[in-house]
Amino acid sequence: MLVLTAAFAAVRKRNDGRVRTVAAAPVPAEAAERDTSSRGAGHVLTPEDIGAELGSGATLVQVSSAFCAPCRSARVLLTQVAQRRDDVAYVDVDAESHLELVRRLDVMRTPTILVLDRAGAVVGRASGVPRMPEIEAVLDSVTSTPVSDVG
């Protein structure tokens, strides 16, 4: 049992915060429901879904909960990233207040970070506090504005 716990902890630590790119092409609803390996694939979020306007280039959506300590660290990091880019918006969504959205996106833990392109399609996803270089790389791939040296 101890070996199993240690193995789980090692895998979780390695993957925690890692940003996975998600196929932006729409996926039929039946396929998306069966395929949990592509969580978020084919999902397009609207301003009504997240309670805020989308960024002109991309939007960083953080799904948080009230008592989530890592959510605070993620919030600081993502706010900094969004402030350095004119075309990127940052939105913090409370999981408890948006249960339908949490279920639709198969959010299993907080923080979960979604990177949306300008049309609202989910193009990246991370669970845990993301790594800044990975977030910036995904943003670079979907926006035309490189990160500035402000900060």
Image (spheres, rainbow, N blue to C red):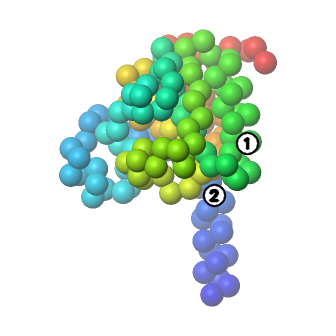
The residue that mark 2 highlights is 14
Residue at (60% x, 35% y) in the render:
92
Frontmost residue, 18 versus 67: 67
Residue at (54% x, 49% y) in the render:
96
Q: Is label 2 in a helix, a strand or a loop?
A: helix
- The answer to which image quadrant residue 101 occupies is top left
Frontmost residue, 20 versus 112: 112
Kindly tell me whether residue 122 is visible in this rendering. yes
- The answer to which image quadrant residue 126 occupies is top right
Structural crowding at the residue carrying mark 1, measured as other residues with C-alpha within 10 Å and reported as few (<14), some (14–19) or many (≥20) = some
Q: CA distance from mark 1 to mark 2?
A: 20 Å
Q: Nearer the viewer, mark 1 or mark 2?
A: 1
If the image is split into quadrants, where does the C terminus sit?
top right
In the rendering, at what x and y percent does residue 41 appear? Answer: 35, 43
Compared with 145, 141 (above or below) is below
Residue at (42% x, 20% y) in the render:
118
The residue that mark 1 highlights is 72
In the rendering, at what x and y percent does residue 63 appear? Answer: 56, 43
N-terminal label among 1 and 2: 2
